[in-house]
Image (cartoon, rainbow, N blue to C red):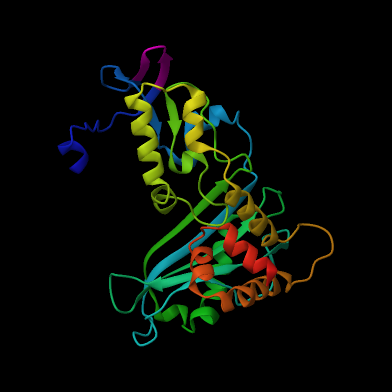
Amino acid sequence: QRFESGGGKVFERSPLASVVVHADGAVLSTAGNAPLRAKLVLDCMGQRSPIVSQLREGAAPDGVCVVVGTCARGYEESTNVFGDIIFSDVPTMAAGKDGCRTQYFWEAFPASSGARDRTTYLFTYMDLEPERPSVEDIFEDYWKLLPSYQGVDLEALTLQRALFGLFVSYRTSPLAAGWDRVLQVGDASGVQSPLSFGGFGALMRHMPRVVDGVSQAIAMDDLSRQQLSRLNTYTPNLQAAWLFQKSMRPPVRGAWSDDFISRVLVGTFDAMLPHGDAVLRPFLQDVLRVDGLALTIGG
């Protein structure tokens, strides 16, 4: 409603068929509607955007965060008052039909639908090696591990909803504009961290910068791919996040200590704790900063 009250138009049931870029604008073809003309096309179609697939030439992702979970009713009201951002209660374990090394993490928080309702996620980081467990394998482990994590019997829970997600990431991110008058934003641009789940939060943290930059580019009619690429420039903290993600996914082959990842996390938080919220909060919000990294590495 806010978008429409500002002069915007929403075209329901109008899937995008093609975008053709001309010197003076872009023409969008949609099913069931006349062609649309635009000065600038914002690609907000997420990590599965067909425009992004064309830009990346079908390249496979370099990493993926697989998430499974549920919202269920039946948790103790007295203990359903806090959340976990990243919690691990098991060492690296064998998962899937190939018994691949996998490190699981939990996220949990009270749900707004009721005092005894709780949302719990089990997630892991991996590459695309064929030995890695499937989403179904990870969900099976979710049911096995949930009782010990939350101290509840599965029979005591009433399932409200179940979900899963695969959040892919690429080392070559953020994604530079590939054509004049077309700009990727949000997950389509690859600006989300390899550590977090992407989506709305990843878009919002960049919103002020993107809004200002797009407004200026349109006002100046400076919509070349070179200028638009300035809005999705190299981001050092994303590269640092890649190091963290890689350290939290066990190799498929070779020597490995099953408690290595737990020891790394404990050591990292022990180093951050004396520096207080100024270092801890950005890390937990997945906003890596030079000052926080320097203090943590310096320990």
- Judge whether residue 21 is colored magenta: yes
Residue 243 position within the rendered picture, expressed as x and y whole percent measured from the top left: 67, 55
Q: Nearer the viewer, residue 249 or 141?
A: 249
Magenta region, residue range: 18-28
The residue depicted at 35 percent of the width and 20 percent of the height is 28
Task: In the rendered view, tell whether residue 14 sits above or below residue 101.
Answer: above
Residue 170's image quarter?
A: top right
The residue depicted at 35 percent of the width and 88 percent of the height is 78
Residue 146 position within the rendered picture, expressed as x and y whole percent measured from the top left: 52, 75
Residue 22's image quarter?
A: top left
Q: From this viewpoint, is residue 75 visible?
A: yes
Task: In the rendered view, tell whether residue 292 sits above or below residue 277.
Answer: above
The residue depicted at 36 percent of the width and 80 percent of the height is 74
The residue depicted at 80 percent of the width and 66 percent of the height is 256
Count of numbered marks: 0
Q: Given the current orientation, which residue lies at the most extreme left position?
A: 5
Task: In the rendered view, tell whether residue 100 sits above or below residue 213.
Answer: below
- Judge whether residue 238 is colored magenta: no
Residue 106 located left or right of residue 10: right
Q: Nearer the viewer, residue 82 or 161?
A: 82
Residue 2 located left or right of residue 264: left
Residue 251 position within the rendered picture, expressed as x and y whole percent measured from the top left: 75, 58
Q: From this viewpoint, is residue 133 visible?
A: no
